[in-house]
Amino acid sequence: MGIVIIGTGLAGYNTAREFRKHDTETPITLVTSDSGRAYYKPRLSNGYRKGDTLADLVQSSPQDLVAELAAQVRSHSAVTRIDREAKRVVLADGEQLDYERLVVATGADPIEPPLAGDGLDRVYQINDLDEYEVFRQAADGASRILIMGGGLIGCEFANDLADAGYSIEMVFPESLPLPKLLPEASGQALYDALEGLGVRFHTGRTVERVDRDGEGVAATLSDGAVIQADLVLSAIGLRPRTTLAAEAGLTTGQGITVDEQLATSDPSIYALGDCAEVCGYVLPYVMPLTNAAKALGPTLAGEPKAVNYPVMPVTVKTSCCQVVAWPPDADAEGEWHIDGVTPDLRAEFYDTEGNLAGFAFTGKRIKERMQLSKQMPALLPGG
Ligand SMILES: Cc1cc2nc3c(=O)[nH]c(=O)nc-3n(C[C@H](O)[C@H](O)[C@H](O)COP(=O)(O)OP(=O)(O)OC[C@H]3O[C@@H](n4cnc5c(N)ncnc54)[C@H](O)[C@@H]3O)c2cc1C
């Protein structure tokens, strides 16, 4: 018995580390369907620019972590079922692990693009180290990469791969990159900067088919245009992995529903990271999960602590035009006020009552980000 943590991403490992600061005795078992190597996921999308090899990206092996955390690590072991009544998890090979408290840190799944064609084996996605490894092997010797999606991951890879000398085509349905984070003027600044690196945009369209074409592919867009490439990288979004929790009868919404102490609808099961919806917030970034782990460590050790979510602006690692943004709620009413000269912009969103409700900085103006973060109330006060 003891604590079982499903997932060895940043959420799973950080939870184990934080717990060990408060309890050195209780057994911990980390179970993961991947290789269990510890790595810092944000580095995947600027690895080429930094000259990182795959070996550079691995921070620790599962064996190192066993020693550091006095924990067991089960790699390549998917959990297929949570039996809440018996308080045990069932692994794919039939083995069962009993828990006193369970932490679900299963991350998110890349959304599969609805594509036709016979070239789908040349469509890649990158949401973990194992997938990155496969992509890098495929990209070795390639020169033309088509990126689907204009969000954070698509833009960062476009910048990184263009810097590494690849010829990049970007396809997405909106008219400008980072549509969920940026107002038009700031999105245009990033568009211009990426274009300056040689990235070619095909906006307002989606990829419908990917067919084999010699050693590469021919991608057919929704307007009938055809783009030749060596491979396709799909970055059209992530969806919290909630199936395991939902099948166990836990409450789920957009993510696994948890309260301010990260407890699910079953008080002996907790969730955090990309799979969790914390008091209504789904924030698939490093700082929210780091804060969540800092609260969950003591909570698991019997010293309950609520998670603190201050305003946590998102940094987009596009070196051609850096971006730091905290977007207003999707349904917020109000307007953007833009100051500066492209690409160095400061954008502030004020709601209809005159309250600051979001902001976006690009280029040299990113250094002003802390002023505005401090002007906004915390999402969750912690304590
Ligand atoms: C390319 C890229 C760049 C990013 N850049 C940034 C950035 O600059 N800044 C930022 O804040 N955020 C960034 N993010 C987001 C950030 O990296 C994630 O929010 C964070 O790493 C998620 O960690 P996690 O532990 O919740 O999930 P994951 O790292 O996805 O870990 C999930 C774990 O659960 C395991 N698992 C899942 N299902 C099962 C199962 N059934 N049984 C056993 N194990 C299971 C997986 O094997 C894995 O170990 C980036 C993301 C990507 C993909």
Image: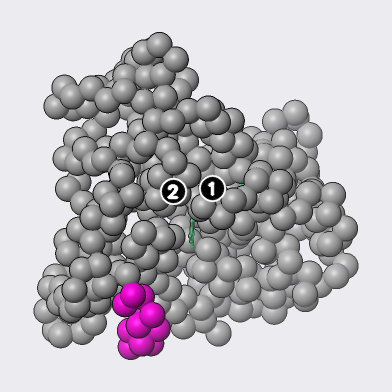
Q: Which colour scheme is used?
A: one colour
Give me the residue at 66% from left, 51% from top: 57
Per the rendered image, the range of residues in magenta is 364-376
The residue tagged 1 is 48
Q: Is mark 2 on a helix, strand or loop?
A: helix
**Residue 220 shown in magenta:** no
Residue 90 is left or right of residue 136, and the answer is right
Instruction: Work out whether residue 245 can be spotted.
Output: no
User: Tag 1: Cα neighbours inside 10 Å, few (<14), some, or many (≥20)?
Assistant: some
Instruction: Work out whether residue 73 can be spotted.
Output: yes
Q: Which of 306 and 69 is in front in this view?
A: 69
Residue 270 is left or right of residue 318, and the answer is right
In the displayed structure, 85 sits above or below 111; it is below
Q: Distance between the residues labelled 1 and 2?
A: 8 Å
First in residue order: circle 1 vs circle 2: 1
Q: What element carries label 1?
A: loop
Give me the residue at 71% from left, 40% from top: 35
Residue 103: quarter of image: bottom right
Type of amino acid at the residue the image marks with label 2: Asp
Magenta residues: mostly which secondary structure?
Answer: helix
Whether disc 2's CB lies below 8 Å from ligand 1 is answered: no
Q: Which of 77 and 266 is in front in this view?
A: 77
The residue tagged 2 is 163
Image position, residue 191 (x, y; %):
24, 53
Find out whether the residues at labels 1 and 2 contact each other: C-beta distance under 8 Å. yes
Image position, residue 137 (x, y; %):
59, 30
In the displayed structure, 267 sits above or below 249; it is below
Q: Nearer the viewer, residue 316 or 309?
A: 316
